[in-house]
Structures are given as structure tokens and as C-alpha cells.
Amino acid sequence: MDSILVLLHTEDDGTLRKASLEALEAARNLGGVLSVGIVGGSAGPALSQIAGCGAARVLVVEGQAFAASRYSSDCPAAVAIFEATLPGLVIAPCTPRWARSLPGAAARMGGVADTHVTGVQFADGQVEAARWFYRQRIEATLRREQRPWFLLLEGGVAAPFVASGDSPAAEPLNPAVKPRSEVTGMVMPQGGGQTIRPEAELLFVTGAGWTKKQKDGAVHIDQAGKLILDFLGKADASLGSSKSLVDLSGEGHAVLPFLSHLNQVGQTGSTPRHPKGLATCCHGEEPHAVGWRFIQERRAVNLDANCGWARGKADVVYVADAFAVITRLNELLAKS
């Protein structure tokens, strides 16, 4: 079995996100000698989260130069940790930060990288990685002879690692970096706030029906937007949308102002992994429903009893007006 290096990066507060703890647990399940590398502004909180992981070595690259995500600092940090451990297999969460920098680090080390890996196991004396192809319609199992092999894992591959005991002793590394850019601050989108929440228990998906004429013959964009945002806040849910709703603005139709292509779920969007999903005012066509393949419990609200969700794509379909349903849900959540 190859020696394994788990590469993790901290968040703004110095902690590790859930996907990082899942990657650590996936690596532990493979067996072999385990090392952990952490990159970030301050690694103290992260070290307490990996306590008891069984790593032979824990290496840390920390400091202001590594607090923000930049290729010019992230790649040298990953290379420094790699050179200190020389593993055959490198496992990391497939976050935007690592997806930008680790393929470059793999190239510098003469290795190969696979991103968006949805499963990893040790079978028949070899490491196997699973990955979707052809717009997530074909799942392939990969084996590679080339080493080092960098595997960037999607969320949900394993249960998050749970710490126990004292924080491990860390070996500091200080790679030389010369960033050509300076992070001066962060600009957040106006008006809608944060609607994409990967850690949320519920995925709430909107369809184009919210922007169509309702029973009174009028369009109620403002009411729809308020209902949806209120529900997201009260239920702490993540927001998704069908392609038809996101693309309505290009057709000259009214749209919900807080939606973007980042919210799009399906064949040309994201494939979320929330435990529960609730679709409203969308019809469950294949291009959209394919993005729900990893949702464990699926429910839908639609006035059409013959919509796609009712054809085996949802566990429960409520034939009802989504405006009325979400209004009532908001009232119940306000009392809880």
C-alpha cells in the first residue's frame, strides 16, 4: 500500500470544513502510513479537529502569506509538504482552492491528478478511484500506475472524521513564496446574501413556475422572492434552481434577482449531496433530475400530478400550489 498524504487547508477562522474531514476519513479507511499537511493563516483550530487521526506526521504551513487562496502560495506550500513526506498517494478535498493549485503541484512532482473523485478504495492490492463522466451518466473506476497520484475528493465520499484526544504535535514548514498579488479584502454580492450552503441538511430547488402567471392571472415575482428567502433563512436550507429558471433573463422574462448559474442544479449545473431535497414549481425533467442522484430523500411540490417528479423521480410529490405550501411552511417554522 502506498504511503498517503492528506492535504487540507483552513477556512478564514482557522478551522477545517466538513469536506476536509471527510477526505481525512477516506484516507484513513485505505490503510497505509498516513501523514497530514495543513495550509492556512493559522492551523491551531484545525489541529484540534484532527486529534486522534493516527497520522505518523503532521506538517503545517501557516502565516499571512498562506491565509488567502492564491496559486503562487498554495502550490509551493503543497510541494513543500509533499517533498517532506514523499508519499505515493495524495488525498485532498476538491475545494476551489485545491482544484486550482494541486494539479500544478502534481505536475511539478512528476505525478498525475484526478479531480471530482466520488469514491476511493483499496481493492485487489490497488487503489481504485471512482469518477463520473459524460455529464454524470457514466461512472468509471480508475487505477493508475503513475505516482504520485493526487486525488481530489468530492464531498460525501466518507463520513467526517471525529476528533478524539489531544491535538497532535505539528512540524512547521516555511516554503519561500513571492506572491505577485495582494488580497485587500472581500466583496460580497449585493441583495441576495449567501444562498449556496453545501453543509445544509436541505436543498430547496426553485423552478420556472415561480415566475409564471398565478391563479389571478398576474406574475408575483416580489412575493415569490420573499417567500423563498424567508424559507431559506428559517430552514437554513441551500438554494438551487432549474436551468429554465436561470436562463429566463436571456429570454426577456422576469427572474428572481438572487439566482445565478451557481445555483443551477442538474446536467449543466451542480450535483449536490444534501440529505434531503425539496423541488418546487419545476417538472423533474431528466437534465435537471440527474443533479439529484445523490440526494437521499426527494420531495416535490407541483400543481401537475403528471409531472416528471411523479414518474419515479421523487419519493413524495405534493400536488399543491407552491406559493400556499411555502407560505404555510414559513408560518410553522416561525413558531418552532
Image (cartoon, grey):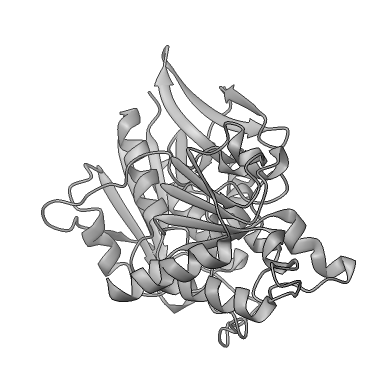
Residue at 69%, 73% in the rendered image = 256
Q: Find the residue positioned furthest to the top.
A: 124
Q: Is residue 70 visible?
A: yes
Residue at 34%, 76% in the rendered image = 334
Q: Tell me the quadrant of the picture where the N terminus can be found.
A: top left
Residue at 53%, 50% in the rendered image = 94
Camera-side residue of 134 and 173: 134
Rendering coords of residue 173 (x, y %): 38, 62
90 sits left or right of 310 in the view: left
Task: Examine the rendered structure and indicate whether residue 64 appears above or below residue 156.
Answer: below
Rendering coords of residue 239 (x, y %): 55, 63
Task: Examine the rendered structure and indicate whether residue 77 appears above or below residue 147.
Answer: below
Q: Tell me the quadrant of the picture where the C terminus can be found.
A: bottom left
Camera-side residue of 244 and 190: 244
Q: Find the residue positioned furthest to the front.
A: 216
Rendering coords of residue 139 (x, y %): 61, 26
Quarter of image, res 228: bottom right
Residue at 55%, 37% in the rendered image = 293
Q: Is residue 11 visible?
A: no
311 sits left or right of 163 in the view: right
209 sits left or right of 80 in the view: right
